[in-house]
Image (cartoon, rainbow, N blue to C red):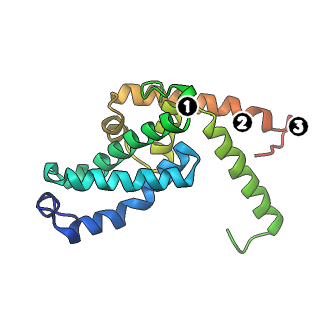
Amino acid sequence: MLSADRLAAGDDAAFAALYTSSRDRLFRFAVRMLSDADAAHDVVQETFLRARMALHTVRDTRSVEGWLFAIARNQVIGQMRRLHPERGVDPEELAADGDPLEDVIKGETAGILRCLVDKLKPEYREVLLLREYEQLSYAEIAAITGATEDVVGMRLLRARKALVRLVRPYMHREGGHAL
């Protein structure tokens, strides 16, 4: 467990432990939001630079990960605005030993789902990724996004409904399914 006192005091070992324990999750979130690994790497680096400069504000280690995700979210929004200025991003709107054929099908299915998730509005994609992939609570997501827990729940519901609508054309009508 990281010590808030050690982080706030600028302890390099505590910050290194924070970096090691959080960078992969932050990267997964950023790359899923941006669909661009290079931009996601930039987001993670900028997140930790900003975190390092503000470590003196850390008081409670239970909130450090949420704090990092909030910084990363702001960086993602900035990247989205830079990468796609025409979209006008608004944060408020924001198995190896198996059968090879099965592995190919699973890979294609995952690819289709990633593409469909990318089509969601940023505010829906954001809460879906934080909840389903990062397993964060509604309260943690609310703290990261600056929304209420009710708004998080509403966005999550809308994200799931939109994803169902997007998946529907890929389903077979004869009882089987493609996904």
Q: CA distance from mark 1 to mark 2?
A: 12 Å
Q: CA distance from mark 1 to mark 3?
A: 26 Å
Kind of element beneath mark 1: helix
Q: CA distance from mark 2 to mark 3?
A: 16 Å
Q: Choose mark 2 or mark 3, whichever is in front.
A: 2
> What number is the disc on residue 174?
3
Residue 50 shown left or right of residue 154 in the figure: left
Q: Inspect the image, locate mark 3, and give the three-letter code of the amino acid beneath it.
A: Glu
Residue matched to label 2 = 167
Above or below 47: residue 118: above
Residue lying at the far bottom in this picture: please name it.
97
Q: Inspect the image, locate mark 1, and give the three-letter code of the amino acid beneath it.
A: Ala
Q: Which class describes the residues within 10 Å of circle 3: few (<14), some (14-19), or many (20+)?
A: few
Q: How many marks?
A: 3
Residue matched to label 1 = 159
Residue at position x 20%, y 55% from top? 61
**Labelled pair 2, 3 in contact (Cβ < 8 Å):** no
Kind of element beneath mark 3: loop
